[in-house]
Amino acid sequence: MMIKLAKIMRFPLILVTFFLLYFPIIIIAILSVNESQSAHAFSGFSLKWYSEIITNTSLRTAIINTFTVAIISTAISTIVGTTVAIGIHAGSKKESTKILMLSNIPIINPDIVTGLSLMIVFSFVRLRFGFPTMLIAHIFFSVPFVILSVLPKLRSLDKDLYYGAVDLGCTPIQAVFKVIIPAIKAGIITGALIAFTMSIDDFVISYFTTGSGFSNFSIWLYARLGRRTFSPAAYAYNTLIIMVTFVTILTMNIKSYKKREE
Amino acid sequence: MGYLGKLSKPYKWAMYLLVGVPIIIMIMLAFTRTLGVDFTGAEFTLDNVTRLNEQVYRQAIRNSLVLSSIATIICFIIGYPVAYMITGLKDKYKWLVLVMVISPMWSNMLLRIIAWEQLFKPNSLLNAIGVSLDLLGTRTAIVIGMVSIYLPFMIFPIFTVLDKMDKSLIEASIDLGASQIQVFTKVIFPLSLSGVASGVMMTFLPSATAFALPERLGGGRILLIGNVIENLFKRVYNYNLGSLLSIVVIVIIFGAMRIINRQEGGLII
Amino acid sequence: MKKISILLVLVLLTISLVACQDKTTMYVLNWGDYINEEVVDAFMKENNINVVIEEVDSNEAMYEKIRSGNTKYDVAVPSDYMIQRLISEGLLNKLDQSRIHDYQEGMFEPAVYQLMEDAGINEYAIPYFYGSIGIMYRNEVEDYVLEHGFGVLFDKDLLPEGSRVGMYNSSRDSVAAALLHLGYDVNTTDTTKLNEAEALLADMDYSIWGDDNLKNEIVAGNLDVALVYSGDYFDILYIVMDEGRDVEFGYMTPSYTNIWVDAMVIPTLSENTYQAHLFINYFLQFDNAMENVEYVGYTPVITGVYEAMKEDEDWDDITGNIYFRDIYYQDGFIGQMYKHISLEHYQMLEDIMMRAKMD
């Protein structure tokens, strides 16, 4: 009975899922080719907002800022996260539980609490808010994800690998670079990808830690909601991003699938 | 590998600084009345604690818990069968459907919220197909928004667990004469609980503490705890009550984590 | 190893690129859609200064940003009562009149001059725009609005069934509108009067508590009436006419209302006071002020600019509307200014609004 019900419900549920996930994205795509700035009605087809991504200076700056912060924070947090993961793996059990607990806090904590905490520390030590504070914040919430994706790879690694390299005359540093890093590459890449995605999309933590007019895309958007300075070029930018990710992921999957078939 | 063990030391201290110090400052702020983080002349007071009992804050906390619980339950009802179904697909389709479920997360979250906001107004793009919704500023709008944004966070962990499940267990129980329903309720579901637990956490936590989503879809008239906290910090400049409420949020969240963890008997993330 | 070092170099390079700018950068704290960016661009070119503008949607948010000191703003544009508060907390510099060359005695509108004098902020601020709060409405409900004034915002029975009402998401403005409707002083601290105002706000079921979006929702037909700043109405009116669309909405300022002035100030934390003075002065120059008004659409504070608009036929639809300026000089018009109130009193207003939103 239940199984039957589940079978009947399967199709509608998939439909509901895709509706919920894709309806807003389709609406954004429609608005990106809407002639009028108003989102209330479709007044005609136009691609002008796509060129405005480049010509609208404030939006362009915000997009550049988003990627600058994402690239730098991903690079730093990947290096830091991998280093720390190697350290945790090598350290004592007690020490590593302690660090893991600490590093899980930014993951579990709601964004608003993380954002506020950082804002409070930064203003307590009188930092000037802007690019540096936002960058520190992004590194802060990215590192734990890198650690979490690298650590399982390290744990499945044969410990003899490292000792073997040392026995063969490698210094510990050389052993790490020549043996460990290549072996955990997949974990590092996953961690970097998560860090990059989180940074690109972040709004709440950036909102509390930025200043001096430094905005990423989300903050640009939030400040202009319902205002004249809002430009539908934001819809166009988002639609482009979605299309690019879609194509990349699909080609990657098709490639890896073909490889597997061979 | 003692030498390498030192590598994580600086990180530990940085985390103490960035996690511990703000909590200490927040606790200090919660029991004083100050201007921002300037503690000169601050005195101990329980005023903020008394104010916590005011109807506004109680209602905001209740709104958060109720709306995000409803959203989480809906996510589970939709997400579990969908995740289960995906595991049953052939490899080729499995990855395609999975990619389709995860891809929307690359679209800016705020922009997706705004798209819903536009549709929930009486005069919207939907008029073209003869539909006029009037949902902006309702709880329904907030719940739809939450489900739409956080559904992938429910599907993904459940899928991961279901997909890794040892198929021989299922075969064994069928051999032992279990009906399909029994296989599901006695074997599959209990084994997938860890995925359900992380799915629930990953949908409930962010939706309960969101502030942009309820602000936009709630038409500014339904306050969740996130809205109240943001308002206290960014408009009223009352860091004291704001800190106290943040501490309340942290306590609720870590309490909820403990409960789910204990039931689950393991680490979630 | 090589890849990592290349990555590191790239990172350092980007950081230094972001950090190094030979131009002075000044930070301006403004309201949304409240400055003509072309004028700002011209200012940047002429003086070789980089101007970064941040936008907020309330005086309270503006206060928080200046007070917290997270960004060291050089110029901000708060309203009268918030300027009083900032002065009382020692957060503003006195302006150096000698560095504002284009200032002339009597160049500002009499109503503005009066406001600044009443607020006691002349030495700290140069006016930017002024206006009042009133009601923006769809033409279908015009008769009701003209008859009842602020009443339509607080009594469901005064509007046709199913009408949708929007309220300003700012405690100061929403409570003031209720007080004005009741005929009370906008600055009252009398708890019984405030309770009455709260009851009015709580009884209504506002469709949207918004800010700049209220005017857009009226134009789109998603709201029938809303509390809107006078300037916001003229701003959107100008845009709709410009696009050649039908104007299906109107505006009225009741004759007992609030009147306000937004003015440029220099916070004490400013590190570029020389540039800040240049910036303030730039917006006093006739051509720049004119261009700025054309974009912003609010009532200009400089008499010369207003007169030039009046002579230009293109502006007839705007300047001919009494709510643009003339009402402030009519007999029987009483514009009350918000005054700086104590922190406790301010928290009271905030609580009133929050409670009114809860059901």
Image (cartoon, coloured by chain):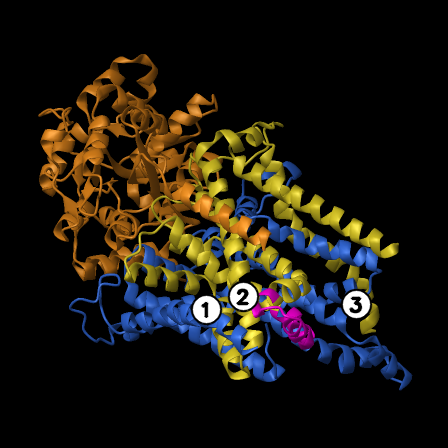
Chain colours: A yellow, B blue, C orange
Residue furthest bottom in the image = B176
Mark 1 touching mark 2, by CB under 8 A? yes
Q: CA distance from mark 1 to mark 3?
A: 48 Å
Please tell me how crowded label 2 is: few (under 14), some (14-19), or many (20+) other residues with Cα within 10 Å.
many
Q: Position of residue C310 (x, y in %)?
A: 25, 17
Magenta part, dominant SS: helix
Q: Amino acid at mark 3?
A: Ala
Circle 1 sits on which residue? Answer: B11
Residue depicted at x 63% and y 36%: B128
Q: Quadrant of the N terminus of chain A?
A: bottom right
Q: Work out whether disc 3 and disc 2 sit on a shared chain.
A: yes
Mark 3 touching mark 2, by CB under 8 A? no
Closer to the camera, B90 or B117? B90
Q: Position of residue C299 (x, y in %)?
A: 26, 28
Circle 3 sits on which residue? Answer: A6
Residue depicted at x 64% and y 51%: B104
Please tell me how crowded label 3 is: few (under 14), some (14-19), or many (20+) other residues with Cα within 10 Å.
few
Q: Amino acid at mark 2?
A: Thr
Q: Work out whether disc 1 and disc 3 sit on a shared chain.
A: no
Q: CA distance from mark 1 to mark 2?
A: 9 Å
Q: Amino acid at mark 1?
A: Tyr
Closer to the camera, C116 or B152? B152
Circle 2 sits on which residue? Answer: A83
Q: Secondary structure at mark 1?
A: helix
Q: Secondary structure at mark 2?
A: helix
Is A210 left, or right, of B199 in this rendering? left
Q: Position of residue B191 (x, y in %)?
A: 72, 79
Residue depicted at x 35% and y 57%: B231
Q: Secondary structure at mark 3?
A: helix
Give the quarter of the image for residue B204: bottom right
